[in-house]
Image: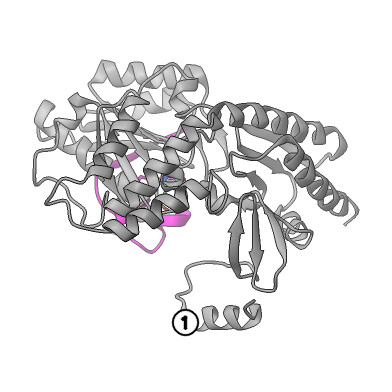
Amino acid sequence: MGDQKAIIAMSDQYIMRTYGRLPIALVRGQGLYVWDADGKRYLDFVSGLAVDSLGHCHPRVVAAIQNQAAQFMHCSNLYHIEPQARLAKLLVENSVLDRVFFCNSGAEAIEAAIKLARKYAKKKHGPERYEIISAYNSFHGRTLAAITATGQAKFQQGLEPLPDGFKYAIFNDLESLKSVIGPHTAAVLLEPIQGEGGVNVADGKYLEGVRRLCDEHGLLLILDEVQCGLGRTGRLFAYEHYGITPDIMALAKALGGGFPIGAMLATEEAASGFAPGDHASTFGGNPLACAAGLAAVQTIIETKLVEHSAKVGDYFLGRLRGLQDRYPFVKEVRGKGLLLGMELSIKAGGVVTRCREQGLLINCIGDHTLRFIPPLIVTGADVDAALKIVRAALDQEGEG
Ligand SMILES: *Cc1c(COP(=O)(O)O)cnc(C)c1O
């Protein structure tokens, strides 16, 4: 057992100050639980930010990584890589997309999507077509292009000049999107459910309308499923809720079962925008990451975690909505599957702290919205256990 205070002191001294960290150091995880360096156990409803969908240290992912690590960790994309080809085949066979580019994170998947969209639009329609329209309140990652696509000024401040060629429209407002489409537009980039922006769910009519507008204007539709993809919302991909299909899709977070990997998928048509030499990544799709990804995605599909996530998510949503009668400061509960948010009219930080003290990890997006993103293996009984702690925290909030 480590000394938690010592770990925190060392971290504070040597790590760059980019994160506002909570005062615990986690050292171990198993299934739905994590332990801090003092040995305290927590029920984990954060899942490493929607990464640990199979729970922590899933035996199939651990075995795949151990085996692959002993056989071949890295070789370069100068050569064909079997686990990479197999993971691409699995993703293609289970989606509407035809080809995959592998990278190491969500931001890189978005970066690749932006580059492909520009290359495709210029080849197909001419050099004046390069603009990407994204939504206000979106989140697409932290590289300069991805943060520019992110429609939240607070993340962009001080980074100017930002890359050119990005415009924004109001989420769930088709007229707003229409008014921004112009002669330079190449693609529309959206999260079907905005995760970091507050768990905002796209309306069915809106996404249908977006797809129609893209078709009318010859624009590519890029869906960012980095957070909402791979079973999180009760469908393997969130677009399946809407009866529409993307031209390009970004994945990451849950893709590696805890191991870092990202992917950008595209239809054959959109993928024709790239030729050899147009994009690359040294580590992207390396044997170790892809072996982890293959084990993770196979497990999600074969153990029917997608259906499970839909069922437990419905139960969880219903129980959270039930809290609205009891606590007048609960403004709205929203989400799909196991990507759920509860917006409060009061600040939510105190609830997060009290839950942590009682052994439950949840997180807060913005100042007012509690987010619940447990591993997809969570059961109704686990949800009940978490809600007991949440209710106690909300009771104190009511008294305070
Ligand atoms: C987390 C996230 C990203 C960025 O992923 P990183 O791996 O942190 O670069 C992009 N888009 C969405 C929707 C996300 O939730």
Q: Over which residues does the magenta segment extend?
A: 143-170
Q: Amino acid at mark 1?
A: Tyr
Can residue 171 be seen from the camera position used here?
A: no
Residue 200 pos. (x, y %): 56, 35
Residue in the image at 59% along x and 59% along y: 29
- Quadrant hosting residue 35: bottom right
Residue in the image at 42% along x and 54% along y: 259
Residue in the image at 67% along x and 27% along y: 314
- The residue carrying mark 1 is 14
Picture mark count: 1
Q: Is residue 151 magenta?
A: yes
> Horizontally, is 123 left or right of 49 in the view?
left
Residue 16 pos. (x, y %): 45, 75
Q: Is residue 303 above or below residue 261?
A: above
The residue positioned farthest toward the right in the image shown: 399
> Horizontally, is 28 left or right of 264 in the view?
right
Q: Is residue 313 above or below residue 158?
A: above
Residue 244 pos. (x, y %): 40, 18
Q: How is the image coloured?
A: one colour
Can residue 393 be seen from the camera position used here?
A: yes
Q: Is residue 182 magenta?
A: no
> Does the Cβ of the disc 1 residue fall within 8 Å of ligand 1?
no
Q: Which quadrant: the N terminus? A: bottom right
**Residue in the foreground of this view, choosing between 281 and 86:** 86
**Residue in the foreground of this view, choosing between 286 and 61:** 61
